[in-house]
Each structure stands twice: as C-alpha cells, then as structure tokens.
Image (tube, helix red, strand yellow):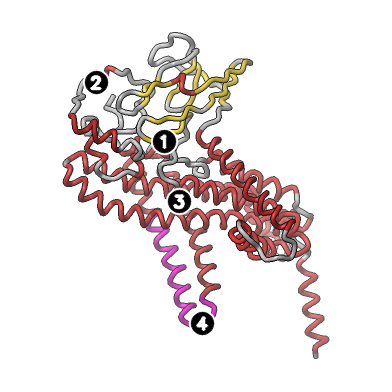
Amino acid sequence: MTSVAIAQHEGHASEPVAHDQVSVEQPVHANTEAHADTTAHAAHGEAAHGEEYAKEEFKIGEMIMHHISDAHQIHLGGSLYIPLPVIILHEGHLDIFSSSNFYSVNEHGELDYHDYKGYRNHHEMIEFVGENASHDAHGHKVMDFSITKSVFGMMLVIVLMIILFRSVANKYKRNVGKAPSGFQNMIEPFILFVRDDIALPSLGKKKAALYTPFLLTVFFFIWMCNILGLIPFLGGFNITGTLSITLVLAAIVFIITSVSGNKHYWGHIFWPPGVPGFVKVILVPIEFMSIFIKPCVLMIRLTANITAGHIIILAFVGLALMFGQQSPAAGYGVGVGSVLFMAFMYCLEMLVAFLQAYVFTLLAALYFGDATQDHHHEHEHDHDHEIQHAH
Amino acid sequence: MGQGLAGIGAGIAAIGAGIGVGKIGGSALEGMARQPEAAGDMRSNMIVAAALVEGVALFAVIVCLLVALG
C-alpha cells in the first residue's frame, strides 16, 4: 500500500500507523512553517505548502477525491477538525455518538482511523465489522443517518435562508408601498428575476402563483449551496455536487410535474396530436421515457457542473503541490501560474454557481408549464378568426 | 486499460463541448453583429443554451470519471 497524501489529508482508513513512520524525517524548518500555515487549507493554499511534508508522497487523485466527497467531520485546516454526530441504525437499535470516536489527529494533521463499538469508518462510509475485527474484515451495511458535512452544510443554508427571507418578508410587511431598504435591496432583483423571467413566461399569470414559491426556494437553495461550496478555508463543502442531493431535488421536480399534469400533458405524451400512426409507435415510447429522463438529466447536469468546477480548481492547486515535490523552485514557478489559472476558474465557478441554479429553476418552470399546459389548438383558431375579422 | 480509455473518453467529451459551445457562441456573435439592439437578449439565451450543451458534455465526463475510479 503506497504512502498517504500530503498535509491535511486523512490517512487511508485501513492503514496501520507504523507503516508511515518508516520514511519520516523531521526537518526543523518544516515545523515552524507548519505553525505559520495551519490555517491554510491545502486545497486553496499556495505552492509553499508543498515543501513542508515532502517526506510523504503527494497523491493528487486522493486529494481531489477527499475534497469532493462527503465526510463525517469538518476539516477546517491544519489539525482542526470539527467532529459531527454519527447516527446509525443497525439491527434495530440506534447508536448516536460523535465521529471523533473514529479517529485521532496525528502530528501531521492527518487522521488515524480506528474502530469504535464494532463500527468502522472505511473511507468515510460506516460499516459494521464487530468487536476486535481484523484489518480486512468484511463490513456489513448499516443505515447511516449521520449529520455529515453535506447535511450540516444544507442545514446551514436552510438557517441562512430562513433568517434572510423572514427578515425581508417582515420588512415588506412593515414598509408597505415604501422604497426597499437593507436586505430588500439585495434580494428584490433576484426574486423579481425568478418571478418575471422564469415563472411567468413558462406558467402564465394565472398558474404562476402556485409554483413560484417552489421555484424561488429551489433557486436560492441551489445558488447558496453552490456558493457555500466555493468558500475557501471553510471545510470544503460539496453539497450540490453529490448525486444524492440533486437526486432529491430532481425527484421533487418530477413529483410536482407528474402530480400537476393535466389531461393535455398526458394526452400529448401517449397520443401525440398531428403525427401519423407509424411515427406515433416510435414517438410514444420516447415520450414516455423522457418523463423519467428529463429529471435525471436535471440531476446530472447540476452535479456534474459543480463537481467538475471543484475538480478543476483542486487540480490546479494540486498541480503546484505536485511540482513542489520535485523541487521548491518548480513548485513556486508552477504555483504562480497555477494560482492565476485557479483565480480565473474561481470567477468562472461563481458564474456557474448562479447559472446552474438558474438553469435548474428555468427547466423546472418549463416542465411545470408543460404539465399545466392549456389546449393549444383553441389559440390557433382564435388567431384565424381575428385575422378574418380584421379584414 | 479502462482508465486509459476513460481519459480518451473525457477528451472526446471536451471536443464535443468545444464544438457545441463554439457554434452557439459563433451564431450568437453573428446575431449580435446584425442587430446590436437585441444583444442583451441574445447574450442571455446564449448562456442558457451553453449551460444545457455543457450539461451533456459533463454527463460524459461523469461516466469517464466513474470508469476511471472503478
């Protein structure tokens, strides 16, 4: 088994501690730099960071995967880890404990994992191996309801949204008819944007009021989750980049679309008007599959965009660290260019954070509008009559 | 072998994204040149279309990532 990743990266869950110590030296300057740099998160740190722990090989793939995946503790940098509650339902009984029982922080700021109460934290997935299990014991699945980093991030976003929008709503109630002030100024353009440019064109004035609250919620939730994932030094949240979370969002859109589908919607899917019979045979299965494929694509688009952005940013930083292993000069040289590129990618990711929220909401509104569509043929006949009357 | 092919797949996905978004940008610029007053409209539609096309390319990237990581 090769050596573990550099700096603030947890060791392999199943690796015995003794394995690492073999090739370790302790240069004095590395310790002083370590103290100065404890706040720099490796994902967003500079090339200088690469030299301190050069005694262990830096594996960029592991670093990237570690920063994208969910975890049971929040790593704020250096040796500072915030353990989160672990909630497990196994064979009928509930175990709630802190995830700090699973690890201890070693002197490099990495985590050494060990088993606890028969549970093992294997690559941040909890499985049951029984007391005194061996290193390679087969783990049994448990139902893991833990508050992981992503769940904590979502709760943070929810609290933020409630505070923000409750205060704005109360301001609106108090300042009826007066000019907006404070947070209202910031939020009003976006709320009007969602209502006027997303909800109204797709849904029409009569039905927009029913769906606008959901569209507003999902827009701001996705946007804020994306932004939260971009804030450096905050533990590296990747909320909307996890398939399970976007799956739920897409599933809600699917449920709302299907429940609010009127007979025109289902009619157009199973009996498309205006197409000859043999085309119907091909079209109906495609239309039926598209009921499920559209939310699936919605889910994958959001996850892929956000995760890809994170991977690119992490890869640029990792590049500098990788070169820093060869020599400090190479590390600094690559680091300068790498940081510039990373800054550019960061700006792009800010745009992508907003854009993906917008595209998700827009498509959800389009699907809702499709589901609640009016009978189109009447409009065409009306236009024909209008033209005739004009003459 | 699978990982090498995944790399090639990701490269082809990048080509697809480049061609798609390039076409969108090109026709958007052409339209803006012909009618500068509608530039704002065209810009927003261009960005939306680019996001949708990128979604498909990133679909392929996710598949390649899954192949590369087993």
Q: Are marks 4 and 1 on the same chain?
A: no
Say whether marks 4 and 1 touch (CB < 8 Å): no
**Tag 1, which chain?**
A
Q: Secondary structure at mark 4?
A: loop
Q: Which mark is residue A76?
A: 1
Q: Secondary structure at mark 3?
A: helix
Image location of residue A351, percent across then percent down: 47, 58
Q: CA distance from mark 2 to mark 4?
A: 68 Å
Q: Which mark is residue A175?
A: none
Q: Compared to A358, does A3 lie above or below?
A: above
Q: Is residue B22 magenta?
A: yes
The mark that comes first in sequence, 2 or 1, is: 2
Q: Residue furthest bottom?
A: A391
Q: Are marks 2 and 4 on the same chain?
A: no
How crowded pointer 2 is (Cα within 10 Å; few <14, some 14-19, many 20+) is rated as few
Three-letter residue code for mark 1? Leu
Three-letter residue code for mark 2? Gln
- In front of the other: A32 or B50: A32
Q: Which residue is mark 3?
A: B58
